[in-house]
Amino acid sequence: MSLIIDQLSCSLGKRRVLHDLAGMEARPGEITALIGPNGAGKSTLLRAIAGITMASGHMTLDGLSLETQSLGQRTRKLYYLPQDTSTQAALSVFEAVLLARRTQVAEPNRQALAAVAQALQSLELNPLAERELAALSGGQRQRVAIAQAIVRRPRLLMLDEPTSALDLHHQLQVLDYLHRLARQDDVIIVIAIHDLNLAARFADHLWVVKEGRHIVSGRPGDVLTPQRLREIYAIEADVEWPPGSSPRITPRSATRRLGS
Ligand SMILES: Nc1ncnc2c1ncn2[C@@H]1O[C@H](COP(=O)(O)OP(=O)(O)O)[C@@H](O)[C@H]1O
Ligand SMILES: [Mg+2]
């Protein structure tokens, strides 16, 4: 049982943004990293899976067609955390995470409070629990949004550049936490991410898209080769793969300007 994209196309306005994506699978218990240049279609793909953006084609989650399900039905199984997590809501961190839990899980108060407390602790948000969302930094708000995503307990969790505003400590902490969450709860996690070293370290599987097309999928060590990086990002990069470790990518130079 997994998320499978058989065939997926999407147009925004008059522009075709995703072209017949196929052969993409994200498995439970694993982190799948979605990588590709700016404008490749990463956010559009995640939004199409979530049902927020209209798309045509065929996708299944645990064997059931997603496209035949209403937005409400999808919402019970999956959660999409968008790139932009700014908010004007006059809620404290604690209230915001509790509200996220309440929208998705019916349970006694005690259980809801325990789930929220655990999420706040895991993301080192306890010191901020009583602060208003509007009074947080971008990175702090991003961690709250991740806590809100986690307490919903989705079967499929999709996060759009969830570490883009985080300092190095919190990048590692969040990805390590998501990695453990996938393993422990058998969740399907898909993360759009630009940092290839983090992707190589924490992802079990990569999906690579460019100009709305699926270029390749596979294990980080198989996908992140100098030739592929040239093809995908138009960069010259060194790739070292120390034994027992994940591949390490050092970008050297841009080979030419990217087309779009
Ligand atoms: N509302 C829209 N209307 C038309 N084109 C759009 C719209 N939103 C995004 N696009 C275009 O779709 C392409 C894919 O965008 P996006 O999925 O956001 O890429 P990524 O997340 O990989 O950076 C880009 O060329 C972008 O300009
Ligand atoms: Mg994006």
Image: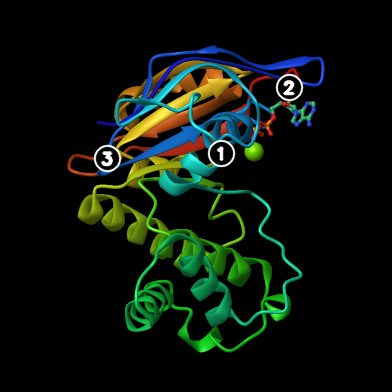
> Which residue is at 59% across, 53% downward?
164
Q: Is residue 212 left or right of residue 12?
A: left
The residue that disc 1 covers is: 71
Instruction: State the residue position of label 2.
Output: 257
Residue at the (58%, 74%) spot, across then down:
96
**Which structural element holds mark 3?**
loop
Could you say which quadrant of the image residue 3 lies in?
top left
Q: Name the one closer to the observer, 51 or 177.
A: 51
Q: Is residue 70 left or right of residue 175?
A: right
10 Å crowding of disc 2: few (<14), some (14-19), many (20+): few
Q: What residue type is disc 1 on? A: Leu
Residue 56 lies in what quarter of the image? top right
Write down the residue under mark 3. 28
Q: Against 58, is 96 above or below? A: below
> Residue 236 location, x and y as percent?
54, 25
CA–CA distance between discs 2 and 3? 37 Å
Q: Which is more N-terminal, label 3 or label 1?
A: 3
**Residue 27, label in figure:** none
**Quadrant of the image containing the N terminus:** top left
Looking at the rendered structure, the secondary structure element under dot 2 is loop
Q: Residue furthest right?
A: 14
The reply to whether callout 2 and callout 1 are in contact (CB within 8 Å) is no
Label 2 CB, ligand 1: below 8 Å? no
Judging from the image, the colouring scheme is: rainbow
Residue 27, can we see it?
Answer: yes
The amino acid sitting under disc 2 is Arg
Crowd band around label 3 with a 10 angstrom C-alpha radius: few (<14), some (14–19), many (20+): some
**In the rendered structure, which disc, 2 or 1, sits on the residue that comes first in sequence?**
1
- Residue furthest toward the left? 244
What residue sits 57% from the left and 34% below the top?
A: 51
